[in-house]
Amino acid sequence: MNITKIKKILSDYLAGKLEGISSDDIMLMFEYPPEPKMGDLAFPCFKLSKVLRKSPVQIAQMLAADFLCEYVDRAEAVNGYLNIYLDKNVYTYEILSEILHAKNNYGNSDIGNGKTVVLDYSSPNVAKPFHIGHLGTTVIGHSLKLLHEKIGYKCIGINYLGDWGTQFGKLITAYKLWGDKQKIEENGLDELVNIYVKFQKESEKDESLLDTARAEFAKLEKHDAENLKLWKWFIDISFIEYETTYKQLGIKFDVITGESASYSITQPVVEELKENSLLIVDDGASIVRLDDYNMPPCMILKSDGSTIYAVRDIATVLDRKKKYKFDKCIYVTANAQILYFNQWFKVLELMGYNWDCVHIPYGTVSINGAKLATRTGNVILLKDLFSTAIEKVKEIIEEKNPNLQNKDETAEAVGVGAIVFHYLMNNRIKDINFIIEDALSFDGSTGPYAQYTYARTCSLLEKGSIDQPFNPAYQPNEEENNVAYVLSLYPEKILEAINSYEPSVITRYIIEICTAFNRFYHEHQIIGADIFRLKLTEAVKIILGDALGLICLKKPEKI
């Protein structure tokens, strides 16, 4: 049992009282009242006024009269709304029974069965470190993958590395001018960043360095042996650090590839664009005009004939469709790329490929108001942010629970989780000003608060057994009913998060669970009380743990 099933029962019932209004239409009209005293569900009657030729107040009063529906205690007409109060004693027992039986499968569905989704996310630029700005694409993308898997989709997570382009000409130039092999082997990616930043500064003084960099990249495109060897070395060094970050986040990809893999498959795309009379030469460059769609032209080839991002992305999606036969292809990148994706999606459409390709943009991140830029060295590296968070959590653990086993493992789970949770609490399109002290608080809407609540359920369940059956004479109180009601929203929250491509729906829902459970915990004895309370605690552990997993958070059982 869950709130979606209740809505379906109510929709069918109300359809029988509303001539000419379908159950499906009614299902879409339910709202949640702003306060519990106004009911568990509300049915606004305003849209029905024109069809039924009655005022909303009259319609609500008519529906409230002789209201007899399964799982409903009563219904009241208030100012054009039908406020519906569920029979919590029946509803609560059914919810708990279903959750305890389904366990982590509660909220699963077969909506996506037989369908494939390809998700392109994380995709760091090789030879540049992960900074806090990269967190968005990585955790939003992986969360969307887990959410789609939850409802039956076959998901293919692709880490499409930025391993090609003129930046490698710059890095190769920098290495040949100032690089120290021993330093790079000792310091890894940090040293690559140092020489890249030096190139940027020196090229501002001497623009000829940019010509040298373009020439070095041109040599790389022609598979010059020396440059190819350096390029592969840079990738290997970069991925040592990336793998550490992915392990901390608990993220594994199904496919790791990069722009370099698309280089050999771009020429057929160029030829197809020519055959379709879409490609024109403008000032030496090859473009597709998009004037009719209120967009600037999409560049396909530079004036020197070298490829650019768009043609590589088009070639890659054609290849993915052939390999995976996807039903939907999702790209998670910053909102600064909205126009770019609109452009090449439109080119793809003009080529006759009307596929479901979706760009999921997200906002920028700053630290205490400071914007980030790898080019200038003004970055907050993700590894440093994680390290700071982990150390601060260790200090808190030493103070609150010095005898805790596996302190380092727990501190990492909570510290990294705090950063991820703080990021995913926000609507993805919003810009975020990241304040680490807020993220690490054990009070309020934070990851540590959510993980600590999960650990609390584990501790309670260690002290008691849920093997006994329900006591049918037990009457749940208001706090217990409210916990069960919040848990019943889980399947609906999953679908809402997927339909809006918004993991923050789950993050905020986690806080709803924690708030409801902790109110119950603080006001009522659990150990030694009726078995119902331990079973309710087990249901919270199941749903809270599953929801934390959907947003890339680990679940320490003791903190």
Image (cartoon, rainbow, N blue to C red):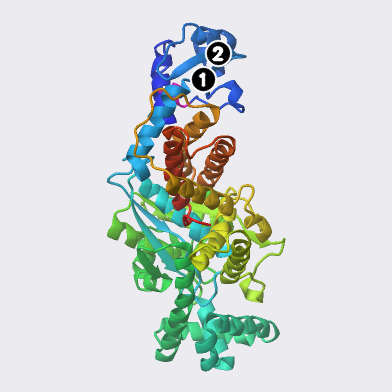
Q: Which residue is mark 2?
A: 76
Residue closer to the observer: 443 or 340: 443
Is there CB contact under 8 Å for labels 1 and 2? yes
Q: Earlier in the sequence, mark 1 or mark 2?
A: 2
Q: Quadrant of residue 5?
A: top left
Measuring 48% from the left and 52% from the top, which residue is drawn there? Answer: 551
Observer-nearest of 388 and 121: 388
Residue sitting nearer the eye, 128 or 242: 242
Query: Foreground: 130 or 2?
Result: 2
Q: Position of residue 79 (x, y in %)?
A: 62, 14
**Span shown in magenta:** 24-28
Q: Which residue is mark 1?
A: 85
Residue 435 visible in this rendered orientation of the protein: no
Amino acid under disc 2: Glu
Between disc 1 and disc 2, the foreground one is 1
Q: Is residue 91 depicted above or below 132 in this figure?
A: above
x and y percentages locating residue 223 in the rendered image: 39, 85
Residue neighbourhood size for the residue with mark 2, other residues' Cα within 10 Å, grouped as few (<14), some (14–19), many (≥20): some
Where residue 112 sits in the image (x, y, percent)? Answer: 33, 44
